[in-house]
Amino acid sequence: MKTTLSTTAKVTRQNLIDSFWLLYCKKSIEKIAVKEICDVAGYNRSTFYVYFKDAYEILAEIEEQTITVEDFKNIVIKNLFYGNLSHDHRKEAILKLILEFFEKNKTYLPVLLGENGDPHFRQKVLKKLTPTVLSIYKKLSPQELMEVSYLMEYQSAAMLSMIAKWYANDKDLPTEQFLELLLAVTTNGVQSELSKYRG
């Protein structure tokens, strides 16, 4: 909303967001009715419509807040696309930055990337990241930039899926082991890493 809200209105609005999120963690947005959100929050539907048009507007706001966090861009650009760090230094940076970012956003991000999340959310993330990442490759030809965009799509999608699965599995691998695996796949490729497990 563009108007300035009173303290009470801000609390009411946040309660509606929190109530929506409790439901969204359990089921997809198509199955969430405004009445359910209001029942959880303890308000009537007329109160809901003062602040939001529908449940999709709440989800869009949460997604927008999550994918504009600068930390995420820094992690991807500095550590996964730049190749100028040594393996040990890059591993240390990823261990710190990825853990910090996902822990900071653990309320929303794992769910948004999970099975109940918006299937277009990852594309929204990539759309935010693409201009910044491509700016690294200013000297490339249009054809080369196109190829880089495909590589970025592949790598980013794989990384997000892998992290989302780890959170969905309640971090079944120790943090350091998981992040070492993530770094290995990012650096060496999937086939190279899978070959280690073949007899």
Image (tube, grey):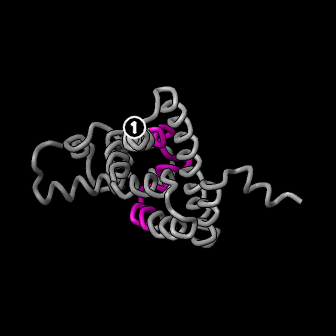
- Look at mark 1 in the image and give the residue it sits on: 138
Residue 38 in sight in this render? no
Q: Is residue 71 above or below residue 30?
A: below
Q: Is residue 143 above or below residue 26?
A: above
Q: Which residues are magenta?
A: 100-123
| Element carrying mark 1 | loop
Q: Residue furthest top?
A: 143
Amino acid type at mark 1: Lys
Location of the C terminus by quadrant is bottom right
Neighbourhood count class around disc 1 (C-alpha, 10 Å): few under 14, some 14–19, many 20 upward? few
* Foreground of the two, 60 or 77: 77
Q: Position of residue 46 (x, y in %)?
A: 22, 42
Residue at x 52% of width, y 54% of height? 83
Q: Residue furthest right?
A: 199
Q: Residue furthest front?
A: 139
Residue at x 59% of width, y 67% of height? 171
Location of the N terminus by quadrant is top left
Question: Would you identify the image quadrant in which residue 132 lies?
Answer: top left
* Foreground of the two, 151 or 57: 151
- Reply yes or no: does residue 111 show up in magenta: yes
Residue at x 46% of width, y 53% of height? 76
Q: Position of residue 193 (x, y in %)?
A: 73, 56
Q: Position of residue 56 (x, y in %)?
A: 37, 39
Question: Would you identify the image quadrant in which residue 174 lies?
Answer: bottom right
Residue at x 54% of width, y 32% of height? 147
Q: Is residue 43 above or below residue 170?
A: above
* Foreground of the two, 74 or 5: 74
- Reply yes or no: does residue 28 show up in magenta: no
* Foreground of the two, 197 or 135: 135
